[in-house]
Amino acid sequence: MVTSTVAATREDADQQNGSGGRRAAGARSLPLRTRWRRDRLLLLIGLPGVLAILVFHYVPLLGNVIAFQQYQPFLGIRDSPFVGFDNFAVLVNGDADFVNALTNTLIITTIQVVFVFPLPIALALLLNSMISERLKRLVQSILYMPHFLSWVIIVALFQQMFGSVGMLNTWLRSADLGSVDIVGVPELFKLVVTAQVIWKDTGWSMILFLAALSRVDVNLYEAAAIDGAGRARRAWHVTLPAIRPVIVLLLILKLGDSLSVGFEQIILQQQAFGTSATEVLDTYVYNNGIVGGNWGVAAAVGLVKGVVSVALVLVANKVAHLFGERGVYSR
């Protein structure tokens, strides 16, 4: 009964959205000159951003040619010898350092996708259920404030709190309770990284889901309540289906960025936890390229990482289409 009533109410909303879609299709059928004359101000406003993306994101992609060279900075790209796919041998031959970096990357990615990604959704649902708007805004502001702190500050705070001479151990020793080793223990590195990501970014990611929740038609909740649905059933039949497109979109983007697990955050803690426990693909590229001088190998690993990330986005988007979602782009 709840599902049928909510579906009927949603169908009315879809009909209204359909008329808006037809109007948008009609606008796209206008001649190009007409659309340019109508939207030229918006296009000119967006032009600096487009140029910045081209200059700082797309033009540097041409530098991937050094993945096929024995590149030396003093020779430059033009004079460095071409070696073909020799730099990619580290991926095929199973280099121990590369395998360790890949393993750590995949483990951290799995933890963040499985355990960290759902937290902003749950937090948004809890915050959205609060009655007081003033209290809701206060809690929201407190939760997303850590996002504006740099990773340097975040790592320093964790070291000052949980380090061997941090506040926690200082208090434990003063109370004759011994000490707890957290920061600096290689086995706990993934737990510490995950805790830092949760504290820093969960509140910020929650805002996107709160924005999606604000667009849910109130009539859907009223229809479900009339049919006797409680909070749990309203959340399952109304809230989650309404924000499902946003969840799918962000999950696809998360998968595309899954092989990048926080270069700055991790490189700041490599000395404390040790390279073996903290090495990921991004730090592997940095340590072998800029520090070690193996520019070609580092570029090869970075290039393969980028190609795999694009493939993950395309595959995840295709799966989203199979389940009826728009994904990052429509078919």
Image (cartoon, helix red, strand yellow):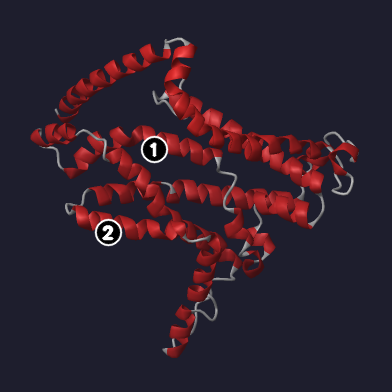
- Foreground mark, 1 or 2, reads 2
Task: Give the answer, above or below, for where 105 lies relative to 11.
Answer: below
Q: Is residue 136 left or right of residue 63?
A: left
In percent of width and height, residue 126 lies at 26, 51
Asked if residue 204 is positioned above or below residue 299 in the image, the reply reads: below
Residue at x-position 42% and y-position 10%: 29
Compare residues 267 and 110 and report the one nearer the observer. Answer: 267
Residue 308 location, x and y as percent? 63, 35
Which corner quadrant of the image does residue 320 belong to? top left
Q: Is there CB contact under 8 Å for labels 1 and 2?
A: no
**Residue 76 vertical placement versus 7 (above, below):** below
Q: Is residue 24 left or right of residue 200?
A: left
Query: Which amino acid, by three-letter code, is at mark 2?
Result: Leu
Q: CA distance from mark 1 to mark 2?
A: 25 Å
> In the rendered picture of this protein, how many numbered marks are placed on residues?
2
Callout 1: SS = helix
Q: Is residue 179 left or right of residue 6?
A: right
Q: Residue 138's mark?
A: 2
The amino acid pointed to by label 1 is Ile
Instruction: Evaluate whether residue 329 shows in this view.
Output: no
Disc 1 or 2, which lies upstream in sequence? 2
* Label placed on residue 247: 1
Q: Which residue occupies 49% across, 13% down?
A: 33
- Quarter in which the N terminus is drawn: top left
What x and y, as percent, mark residue 279?
A: 66, 56
Q: Is residue 247 something that shows in the picture? A: yes
Indicate the quadrant where residue 263 lies: bottom right
